[in-house]
Image: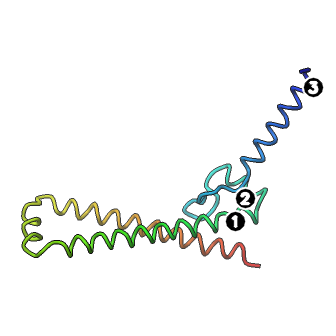
Amino acid sequence: MNKAASWTMGLIATAAAGYWLSLPPDGVALDESCQPSDPQAVVSEILHHQDFWLAQKSAVDEALRAEISLLAGKEKRRDQMNDGRNTIEQRMTRLSNRDVSGDEQAVAQAQREQIARLARLTRCQVAINQKLAP
């Protein structure tokens, strides 16, 4: 292979890789302010504006469904656990757990983080719908 062919193949490969990198990401690629979060997402938004936001709409919708399903699953498991215990077992468990407040704080922190994720995804969903509106 001569230099020109090698150079041409390199140029084609670079262009193909650049195009591939600029395609809209499959997952949520938005920051807290619902703007593209990384350089690849910014380039994709510039080059493929409508497709980028449609892909982000799908990704955000899917992420919201997953978060809500996860929340519902946790609620169901907690209810099943509570139904399975009787009052005496619950009292004994509370008495034996010396670090209940630490566990409760960890659960509360996890709930706050999940609520924050849901709020961010919902905010981004509204922002995307506004961007896609005619």
Position of residue 49 relative to residue 1, above or below, is below
Q: Nearer the viewer, residue 9 or 119?
A: 9
Would residue 107 appear left or right of 30 to someone viewing this image? left
Q: Which mark is residue 4?
A: 3
Q: How far across and down, in percent of the image, does residue 71 sit?
A: 39, 70
Q: How far across and down, in percent of the image, does residue 91 sit?
A: 8, 70
- Along the polypeptide, which appears first: circle 2 or circle 3? 3
Q: How far across and down, in percent of the image, does residue 6 sit?
A: 87, 26
Where does label 2 land, which residue? 45
Position of the N terminus, as image quadrant, is top right
**What residue is rendered at 74% in x and 50% in y?**
22
**What residue is rendered at 52% in x and 69% in y?**
64
Position of residue 86 relative to residue 103, above or below, is below
Position of the C terminus, as image quadrant, is bottom right
- The quarter of the picture where residue 107 lies is bottom left
Q: Going by the picture, which residue comes out furthest to the bottom? A: 134
Q: What kind of element bears circle 1?
A: helix
Would residue 12 appear left or right of 36 to someone viewing this image? right
Whether the residues at callouts 2 and 1 have beta carbons within 8 Å, the answer is yes
Badge 1: residue crowd in 10 Å (few <14, some 14–19, many ≥20): many
Q: Marks 2 and 1, Cα distance to the nearest angstrom?
A: 7 Å
Position of residue 23 relative to residue 90, above or below, is above
Q: Nearer the viewer, residue 86 or 40?
A: 86
Tag nearer the camera, 2 or 3:
3
